[in-house]
Image (cartoon, rainbow, N blue to C red):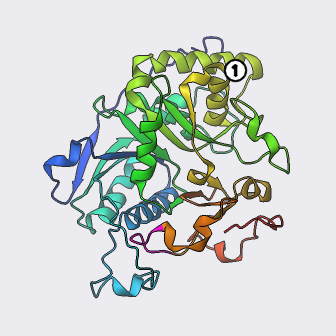
Amino acid sequence: LFQSRGPIITLRKESRFNWKVGPLTSKVQSNDTIHITQFIRGTRAALRAITMLKSLLYFQNRFHSNTSNCTPFEPFGNSSCAEKIHPPQNIIHMHLVCDRNLWTMLESQLQNCSLPYLKCSFYDVESYVNFAQRIPNGHITGPTPVAKLWIPYILPPWVIKTIVPDSDMLWNENPLMLWKIFEQFNPTQMIELAWEQQSYDPLCSEDQIKPLPSSGVNGGLVLMHLERMRNIRWDVTIEQFIQLRLDQVGILGEGEQEVYSFLIRMKPDWYYRIPCEWNTQVYSAVAVHCCPIIWPDRRPDVSHRCFDVADNKSFVIGALVHYDTPLKPEEPGWENSVVAGTPRSGDVLT
């Protein structure tokens, strides 16, 4: 690949470092385990990843509000709604592809929780980023997101499926609900992404364009059916599509998102469109207009039916929000950041 641009790229698999947090049950590698993969570079991204993981575990109802140490951190009061639910609490296996110098910090943060239902595997990100750097790419995020295209060969072969969220996302739903979307795949589908919400149409009327609107997909969340990707020799296939795209444009302007959008237009039968509430992008006014959601304050054991807004079909409850903005939650200056824009009349947004 890229013989005219540099040496042929070959992916060198790194030895993997698996690390446990707390005593793991025998079910840790069962079919009930949810696999989540994150690429993390830098301390800021590592701290965001911890926050993201906390929001995920919160909506598994892992928060111990009945303990004295945790009571001051309870975000919501008790609900008067009589309809309670019991969120499934699947084991979470985090695959953290990150800077080696972050391993100790992440281990310390997670080990302090002593969670018996969380497993972490660490992978050195450097070799994969070096690999991706050979691909001409002008996107501001650099080569790291491009390296995600080779996740089927970074993770061990016994991992069949994985969810790949960016670190700047916050959960508002049990991750099992997202994991279950794999069950909706037909036999040919293997990747799932939401559309890019930065529509060129301020009225967001591109919804009927198939398989994709001109703005393509957003790479903030990807569901990968790894077994199917390996079966079609994804490594060879994706390199061929990258080469075809580079022959057209010379350099990737949108990183891995551009590759996904190009591939989906060529192979639409491989693609499943994820609903926008699983990747609600807040970086611009048009983006939030194209996916109007609400985000009710609720405990994870409270049903959505406890909120009147659930009966209004003009909007949905946000499940995973993507803060693809220069400032991220918890960073200095976040409180004074400018709101993306004024909602259109009739839209209910958070």
Tell me which residue sits at (84%, 43%) in the image: 200
Query: Which of the two residues, 193 or 45, is positioned nearer the viewer here?
Result: 193
Residue reaching furthest to the top: 3
Which residue was labeled with disc 1?
Answer: 246
Main secondary structure found in the magenta portion? loop
Q: Is residue 302 magenta?
A: yes
Establish if 229 lies above or below 70. above
- In this image, 159 relative to 24: left or right? right
3 vs 27, left or right, is: right
Query: Which residue does the image show at 78% across and 34% down from the upper left?
Result: 214
| Magenta region includes residue 179 | no
Residue 28 at what x, y percent from top left?
Answer: 21, 47
Front-most of residues 255 and 278? 278
Direction from residue 340 to residue 321 in the image, left or right:
left
Give the quarter of the image for residue 248. Answer: top right
Q: Amino acid at mark 1?
A: Leu
The quadrant of the picture occupied by the N terminus is top right
Q: Position of residue 289 (x, y in %)?
A: 76, 57
Is residue 96 in sight in this rendering?
no
- For residue 201, what is the image quadrant? top right
Which corner quadrant of the image does residue 57 belong to? bottom left
Residue at the (18%, 47%) spot, across then down: 27
Depth check: give the residue in front, 171 or 165.
171
Q: Position of residue 209 (x, y in %)?
A: 75, 33
The C terminus, quarter of image? bottom right
Label 1 crowding class (10 Å Cα cut-off): few <14, some 14-19, many 20+? Answer: some
Where's residue 348, x and y in %? 71, 67
Label 1 SS? helix
Q: Is residue 294 above or below residue 253?
A: below
**Closer-to-camera residue (141/227):** 227
Q: Which residues are magenta?
A: 298-303
